[in-house]
Amino acid sequence: MKNQLYFLIIIMVVSNFYLLSSSRLRALIRIAAVQGIFLGLFPFITQASHFSQHTLIIGIGAMALKGIAIPLLLFRALRGVEEYREEKPYIGYTMSICIGIVIVSCAFWVGSHIAASAFFPFPALISLAMSLAAVGFFLIVARKKALTQVIGYLVLENAIYCFGISLSVEQSLLVEMGVLLDLLVGVFIMGVVIYHINREFDSINTESLEELKE
Amino acid sequence: MGKMMLLQYLSPVLALVCAPFLLGIINRTKAVFAGRKGQPLLQTYFDIAKLLRKGAVYSTTTSWLFRAGPIVSLAAVVVACFIIPIGKCGAPISFTGDIVLFMYLLGIARFFVVLAALDTGSPFEGMGASREVFFSVLAEPVFLLCILALAHTHDLRFFSILGGMSPYAIVPALLAGISLFVVMLAENARIPIDDPTTHLELTMIHEVMVLDHGGPDFALITYGSALKLWLFGLVVVRAILPFHPASMLLDCSITLCTMAVCAVIVGIVESVTARLRLLRVPQLLIGAAALAALALFAGEGGLFL
């Protein structure tokens, strides 16, 4: 069981590196979708000892939403936009990967100092959550295109989800569903925002928002 | 004891004899992909034999460095062949830290090819030399990182890392293996880093450095690069191989078969991908470094998991 968990964690970290190094917007959405689907597998492993309908709903719900619904929404948002890649991010791709290595090392170094306890049965999941959160923030800060920033937000949300399932306490289904719903609504609104930015400025660079005048 | 001693020499002998065959397999795979019949599998041997029979012309602007380049670099790679073990048979030169010797031998080989290239005074060769050195600066640390990731429970010698009694846990081995594969492509100037068959000097990396070598000198260089490919292939294969049978000869033959598969994979990669823009190459190598770093964390008894 632990091996499967590590396998999933490694896949998530590799996908993080891919998100940091890719400039193609469609590839980014696809990788975010893959990340969502693998994230949905986590509850089945961590909650295997007390498996219930609840686990099933959280897992399948995350997969359906993060792996299918949100990527479709984002693809839809991109449909009218004639942009395929992030050309000039604030921080280049090679540098981004280097920073990613530092982020992941720090996260796993901190995580290795957390002793496994009844409350935190899987410290490695906390390391993963920390690295996801840092990569999410980094994507939001270091990229110009609105869509890439939305992906950063998604990765950030993945981190929260990951942190949630690393706890052994039974989470309330209502809270989990609330978070997922918030996410969906958030991405929905961002899709509309992307559409409007594009219509106003003929690009989805958030830079152009800095020059707004009354 | 005597038999063990003899078996140790199996690895260098196989390398010296079979290395050009790997290039044959790669070329045949590419030919099949392109729908051609392809050159004979032994073509590299024929090429080397033909080149050895030719004379060489030396430019008057070159010095002894130009002639020493191919000889020294081949000698260094041949010594390196005595370090890498093939499976459990072991290698004639083996001591703690032989990895460092291996890296330095390959470094010397590259250094002398680069010196010979600079010695010609041709601007193309200088450009190729600069690129070759730049990419190897990135590739070498990645190789060391991969070896460290594989070695963290053993001592730092090739025999305990590559001739291990038990295979590695699948996740770190896979990560390190992919990373080593990229290093292999970079160090041996294959697509997507460099195109060995290109005819445009401006886009060449390795080939442009050896443009002025002809005849026996070029034969030495071709043979040297075949040996280098063999050595890196051996490291990649031993890192990934998921089972190591107890019998030495079985282990050895499985390794050899996997080497052939590895060559086919190189051929497939070369057929389905285009050469990367030069600016993108560092990104690929840094990505490989990221995987290697991850392999370092992910192993059993790894650093952080």
Image (cartoon, rainbow, N blue to C red):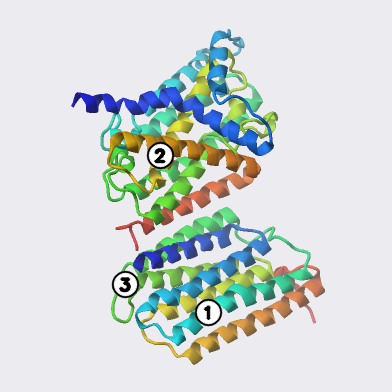
Circle 1 SS class? helix
Residue B149 higher or lower than B93, as above or below = below
Question: Which residue is labeled 2 in the image?
Answer: B235
Residue depicted at 34% across the width and 79% down the height: A49
Q: Nearer the viewer, residue B61 or B247?
A: B247
Q: Residues within 10 Å of mark 2 (few under 14, many from 20)?
A: many
Chain of the residue where label 3 is placed in the rendered structure: A
- Kindly identify the residue that appears in the image at 55 percent across and 28 percent down: B24
Q: Residue at x 65, y 27 (%)?
A: B124
Q: CA distance from mark 3 to mark 2?
A: 36 Å
The 10 Å Cα crowd at callout 1, few under 14, some 14 to 19, many 20 or more, is some
Q: Chain of mark 1?
A: A
The label nearer to you, 1 versus 2, is: 1
Question: A120 and A33: which one is in front?
Answer: A33
Q: Which quadrant would residue B210 be assigned to in this image? A: top right
Amino acid of disc 3: Ile
Which chain contains the residue that carries disc 2? B
Q: Position of residue B296 (x, y in %)?
A: 38, 54
Chain-order first, disc 3 or disc 1: 1
Instruction: Name the disc covering residue A114, or none.
Output: 3
Labels 3 and 2 within one chain = no
Q: Position of residue B219 (x, y in %)?
A: 53, 17
Real-space Cα separation, disc 3 to disc 1, in angstroms? 29 Å
Q: Is residue B281 left or right of residue B201?
A: left
